[in-house]
Image (cartoon, rainbow, N blue to C red):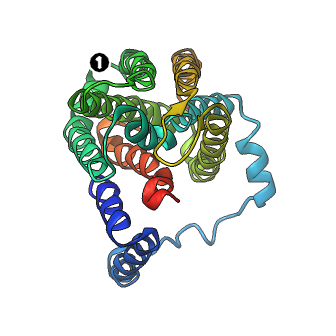
Amino acid sequence: SVVGVPVGLVIGNNFGWNMTFIALGLLGMPIFFIAAYVLPDLNAHLGAARIHPLESLRRTFTVRNHLNAFALIIALTCSGFLIFPYVSAYYVGNVGMSEQQLPWVYIAGGILTLVASPIIGRWADRAGKLFVFRVIAPLSALLMFAITHLQSAGIAFAIMVFGALMVCNVGRMIPAMAMVTASVAPRNRGAFLSANSSVQHIFGGVGAYVGGLMVQQAGEGAPLEGFESVGWLSAGIGLSSVWLAGRLRSSEHEDTITAAELAFPAAAEATFDLGEPLIACVDGE
């Protein structure tokens, strides 16, 4: 995720947006062969009694703790996707950064994320996941407000703000995912996490759509208008996640879930989420 976002931008800017997808497909092909030798068989459960998929779905969306977990994930996802799809256009049109400089923004942010993730994970395990979340989530909201009000700030300062936002965005996701995972009984975790992935993508789209309704741009490379209002909304939703996180309760059958174990997966997911909308800024498409 750290390497792929800036490299994808470089490929798209120099060879066209479709070449990014071609490169992704070619680099992904070896996974088929590697997986055949590396991944173990997961067939021990096939002989056990199976729950009907609809019943499993009903259980996933009717348990109160699951709904609290979904609410937290929705708040985190929406607050991020309200602004992230438009940060690149904002940096080019409002801050004055060139498209050739954008990859360096994501390289800097990615390196900071890579270094900070395990540190935050260990901190959350020592100090408490909810405590760490309540520290980082307001900082993330403050930075979401700041990044939408940069206007003509210097490029170096803009890179610093984006890097800090990436660290805080990942930093709140690490304890959040640890708390969410621990709130679901192990026997229900597979169904829940599958549904959680769908919920994240749905409300990521909702956040991006609402942000698009609030933002206006006269033409390619022109300044974005209305992005400040998006920042207020994103920060407000981000702050609400502090209250939502306090509603989560650990499962009665909780196994040991450490934030350190989830640090890199959570960081990779959060960093990848930042990169998903970037194709919109390549070649002005």
| Point 48% across, 57% down: residue | 284
Identify the image quadrant of the N terminus.
bottom left
Q: Amino acid at mark 1?
A: Ala
Between 48 and 106, the residue placed more toward the observer is 106
Is 192 situated left or right of 284 in this image? right
In which quadrant of the rendered view does residue 213 lie? top right
Q: Looking at the picture, how far across and down is residue 149, in whole percent?
A: 43, 21
| Point 52% across, 22% down: residue | 228
In which quadrant of the rendered view does residue 64 lie? top right
Task: Using a 10 Å C-alpha cutoff, classify the residue at mark 1 as few (fewer than 14 neighbours), some (14 to 19) or many (20 or more).
Answer: few
| Point 35% across, 43% down: residue | 267
Is 114 situated left or right of 44 in this image? left
Is 3 situated left or right of 73 in this image? left
SS at circle 1: helix
Between 193 and 137, the residue placed more toward the observer is 137
The mark total stands at: 1
Relative to 149, residue 171 above or below:
below
Between 168 and 101, the residue placed more toward the observer is 101
Which residue is the site of mark 1?
127
| Point 32% across, 68% down: residue | 14
